[in-house]
Amino acid sequence: MKRIANGRRLALALTTILALTGLAATVALAGGSPGGPPDKLVIAYQPGIGYAPLIVIKDQRWIEKRYPGTQIEWKVLASGAAITDGVIKGDIHVGAGGVGPLLVGWARGVDWKYIAPLNEGDLWLMAKDPSIKTIEDLRGKRIAMPSPTSIQAMVLRKMAQVKLGDAKALDRGIISMDHPDAMQALLSGQIDAHLTSPPFQFQEKVRGAHVIARSYTYFGAHSFLGAMVTQKFYDEHTAFSKALYQDVVRAIALIEKNPDRVAKILQADAGGSPTNRQFKQWITNPALKYTTRPRGLVRFAAFMNRIGAISRMPSSWRELVFPPVYPTKGS
Amino acid sequence: MASTLDNVSRTREQPANGSRSTGEPLLSVEHVRLGYWTPAGFNLAVGDVSFEVQRRERIIVIGPSGCGKSTLLKAIAGFISPAGGEISVAGRTAPPPGPDRAVVFQEFDQLFAWRTVLDNVAYPLRVNRRRRADATASARQFLELTGLGHAADRYPHQLSGGMKQRVAIARALALEPAILLMDEPFGSLDALTRARLQGELNAILDRTHTTLLFVTHSIDEALVLGDRVVVLGNAPSTVQELVDVRDVGAPDSAAYADMRRRLRRLLANKGEEVDENAVFV
Amino acid sequence: MQSSSSPAAATALSEPLRRPRVVGWGRLPAWLRFTLLLAALVGLWQAYVSLKDVNPLLFASPRAVAEAFVDGWRDGTIPRATWTTVKVLALGIGIGALVAAVLTVFATLTKIGDDLLVLLTSILNPLPGVAVLPLALLWFGLNTNALLFVIANATIWPIAINVTTGFRTVNPTIVAVGRNIGLSSRRLVTDVLAPAALPHTISGLKAAWAFGWRTIIAAELVFGVSGADGGLGFYINNAKLYLRIPQVFAGLVTIAILGVLFETVFGVLERRTVVRWGMKTVPATSGGGEG
Ligand SMILES: Nc1ncnc2c1ncn2[C@@H]1O[C@H](COP(=O)(O)OP(=O)(O)OP(=O)(O)O)[C@@H](O)[C@H]1O
Ligand SMILES: [Mg+2]
């Protein structure tokens, strides 16, 4: 009797494991992407005015107008990790994100590059407690940022390396939170600091937080966000990709030439609030400069490589962008 | 059968004789009423029972099933307080449970499952301030006496029902109580073991001068062990008769047969199924 | 596959077929059977990865996992994460057990305490542990205390309800024996009630460990306290963010091994106590109360 009971249990375990293996296989196989012109396209980005060029393209329906046969879906996802996952699985074709995930993915073999950098951004480290004035005061404190692989996390480690002599000195305090939650948490005193981005840093400043440090101090002016596609996608849809780059250039030109109009677009996209004056202030703030010129990519890669976040180095900034970006003389 | 019979015949001296009516009784039960609260109300088991037990005396309580024998025994042991009347032991009224009235319960599961057979007997001795080595030695001795020397290191679940009961008997005997309370302790034993243990019990009581209150269904057991027999009626029970059986002699004597018939008739009137499987039929 | 039929059919079919065989699967010792089976599964896994050319960003080969596992143990990241998780879990279960003990005493001594326990258990026990995490974060902030609260909450109820049932269902005769041999109330509790209720207590602890273990891993995945202080859930999440898929698998393997280890410890504990004493183990009650 006992032996039979064991046998049944074994059979059950075996079946379960086979089923799981099958499931994993299905998941793994779902990664293939279709050839030919893009008849379906998913573009994903995150909340924040850093993505303004994409929001303009979406609002103006430039892609839809150029490719009427393409079914286009715009997705706003809360985390960079979700966008990375989507691109790896092939569910997302154009994913926008920070320099951190770009480099982490690139180094791990995600075959992607920036088809169009979106901006340079000065990322501020904010605190509310007046007794926290410098990086040194942050030892043992809780510091929020989108994730341990975000560009903010890399910036924090650089700050820790410069000011505290150890890049990992503040790792213990890193808390993964998206920016809106982190802003609430900072203002209500649940966390001690927030390494953030526009417009959250502007809002936090207005609501009583102060700036402890800025990323430009440590990396010089540097790229913040960009739109990524995979090499495979670029090879299969080169014309589309080049056009997308031109759309971003055009959107940035519109932001520069007519910030009032773009502010209205952003306000409408955000559901009506805050005011378009507020949006205009944000997109014209010098902390955020819309440009397709990549800057500081190699510097970031070198730093991330030194602290072990990535295990290989690009030979030049060109290795991280597609040909349409080459003429911008990046770094 | 006949040889066993000889072994367990009433060969003991009868020290209780002299002290029977002298001095204060060790145990006195006066107009005791006992019962249980049930959802239907108070259910009286023992209606009105009185008797006294002298030191060294051996009292057998006999009566139909469900008449309250176990209830009475538990009340004497201090687990149930009477709804009326009074129980006193050695001059103390309603004493709380204690090792001076060691009990062998009717239930099988009265051993500590997590202790070995040896420890089941030795542990109560240690609780009562006996030194470890002393307690162990004493426990071994009483286990030998009940024929369980070979099983000393087993756990209770590895014993048969009768063996478990014998451990409980060894435990109670080892405590050397002033009065030993036994509730059908031999009920689950085979005839030979039962007869042997009856003999051993008599011998031990002779040696230790222990007073005994013993519940049984078996008339023969009552006659072999008892000085006096308390015959209870149906619940709510009263004492039907208090019979002196000290002088009935050996089981093959005429007096014994007379007494046996008399008790049998008393019980039969009360609808009791007399234990026909008893040794001395 | 045949074993999916009813027990009776399985007995009828397989007994006479299997018996005569001299060398059969069933004749091998258990450890060998499981080792062979495990080896076969790992082989299957490796074969799948090698033949199918799977995306290494989605699925790892056993070889890569083994390497990540060994590296993780060598460089101290997995032991550190494991230690963090186990430490928080032990502390959480400790707190849970303490609160459960108080509740149990209260429930054993008073009727209202008993009712309260039954009520609280039926309300709080079915809640998945992580469900209270957002509230815990609000109350305790983003720190270990929130995790401790969640784990304590997940463990109090199975322990309390099992131990209470254990105490309540102790055979009255054995308690009577304890009083008869002259035990004080304190020793009656420690020497009679406690061992008599041990099967239930162990069930409670087992259930508590199972709940707590799942809860802490889930909570760490949702909110790994962070950085160098992160536990196994955080380790897995972090590895995933860095796209180190073999490390993700290595973390899962560690969790599985720890699970087996804890089960083994409980198994040994039971074999040394309740099984040895012939006290049947009672399955953990999940609520309700009456035993
Ligand atoms: N715990 C209890 N609660 C309620 N009623 C009880 C309880 N124990 C016994 N009784 C009742 O009390 C009466 C006497 O029971 P008791 O066990 O004393 O009988 P007994 O004479 O020992 O019977 P037996 O010879 O079968 O052992 C019975 O009617 C029984 O149903
Ligand atoms: Mg009885």
Image (cartoon, coloured by chain):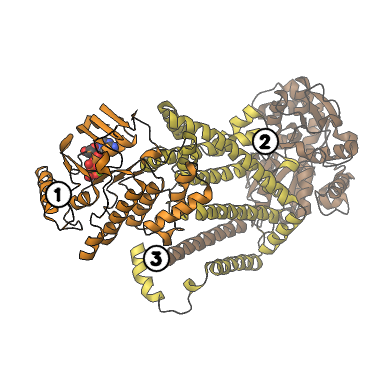
Q: Position of residue C267 (x, y in %)?
A: 53, 54
Amino acid type, residue under disc 3 in the picture: Met
Question: Three-letter amino acid code at disc 1?
Answer: Glu
Q: Is residue A188 above or below residue C285?
A: above
Image position of B248 (left or right of B96): left
From mark 3 to mark 1, how far is it between C-alphas? 43 Å
The residue positioned 71% from the left and 29% from the top of the image is A266
Q: Is mark 2 within 8 Å of ligand 1?
A: no
Identify the hue of chain B.
orange
**Residue C183 drawn at (x, y percent):** 45, 38
User: Which chain shows up in yellow?
Assistant: C
Query: What separation in Å lies between label 2 and label 1 (alpha carbons)?
Result: 70 Å
In this picture, residue A314 sits left or right of residue A173: right
Residue appearing at x 50%, y 46% in the figure: C202
- Reading the image, the residue beneath label 2 is C144
Q: Is residue A172 visible?
A: yes
Q: Which mark is residue A1?
A: 3
The residue nearer to you, when weighing C92 against B251, is B251
The residue at which mark 1 appears reads as B273
Judging from the image, what is the letter of the chain drawn in brown?
A
